Image (cartoon, rainbow, N blue to C red):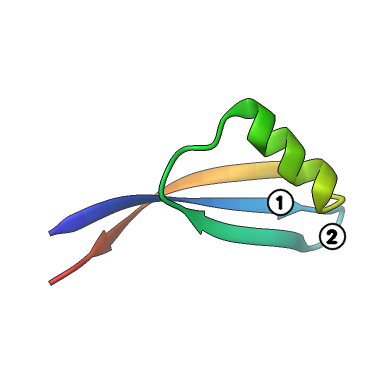
């Protein structure tokens, strides 16, 4: 059975500043908050699928 999750990555100029798996798709306000909080310059949200037995 597949379970859908989301993965957010906050990027700085040359490296990843922060990343986390979420059970929901974050809002624009939450994404902006994460960028500011972790001193990044951009963020990417990916959809991932986990296989659970």
Q: Is residue 28 above or below residue 44?
A: above
Describe the element under mark 1 as helix, strand or loop: strand
Which residue is pictured at 24% across the width and 54% down the height? 3
**Quarter of the rendering occupied by the N terminus:** bottom left
| Extreme-bottom residue of the structure | 53
The crowd level at tag 2 (other Cα within 10 Å; few <14, some 14-19, many 20+) is: few
Estimate the x, y position of residue 9 in percent, counting from the top left.
63, 53
Question: Does residue 35 appear to the left or right of 22 in the view shown?
Answer: right
Q: Is residue 52 above or below residue 24?
A: below
Query: How many marks do you count on the picture?
Result: 2
Estimate the x, y position of residue 2 in percent, counting from the top left.
19, 56
Question: Does residue 33 appear to the left or right of 24 in the view shown?
Answer: right
Q: Which residue is mark 2?
A: 14
Which residue is pictured at 71% across the width and 51% down the height? 10
| Extreme-top residue of the structure | 28
Which residue is pictured at 58% across the width and 50% down the height? 8
* Residue 42, visible in the rendered structure: no
Estimate the x, y position of residue 40 in percent, counting from the top left.
83, 49
The crowd level at tag 1 (other Cα within 10 Å; few <14, some 14-19, many 20+) is: many
Describe the element under mark 2 as helix, strand or loop: loop
* Residue 50, visible in the rendered structure: yes
Question: Does residue 28 appear to the left or right of 3 in the view shown?
Answer: right
Q: What is the distance, in whole Å, between disc 2 and disc 1 at their CAs?
A: 11 Å
Question: Does residue 22 appear to the left or right of 3 in the view shown?
Answer: right
Estimate the x, y position of residue 13 in percent, counting from the top left.
87, 53
Out of 38 and 46, give the one closest to the viewer. Answer: 38
Out of 22 and 40, give the one closest to the viewer. Answer: 22
Q: Is residue 53 above or below residue 43?
A: below
Q: Which mark is residue 22?
A: none
**Quarter of the rendering occupied by the C terminus:** bottom left
Q: Does the residue at mark 2 contact the one at mark 1 (Cβ under 8 Å)? A: no
Q: Which residue is mark 1?
A: 10
């Amino acid at each position: 059975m597949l379970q859908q999750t989301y993965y957010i990555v906050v990027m700085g100029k040359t490296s990843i500043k922060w990343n986390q798996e979420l059970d929901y798709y974050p809002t624009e306000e939450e994404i902006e908050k994460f960028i500011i909080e972790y001193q990044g310059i951009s963020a990417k949200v990916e959809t991932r699928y986990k296989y659970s037995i």
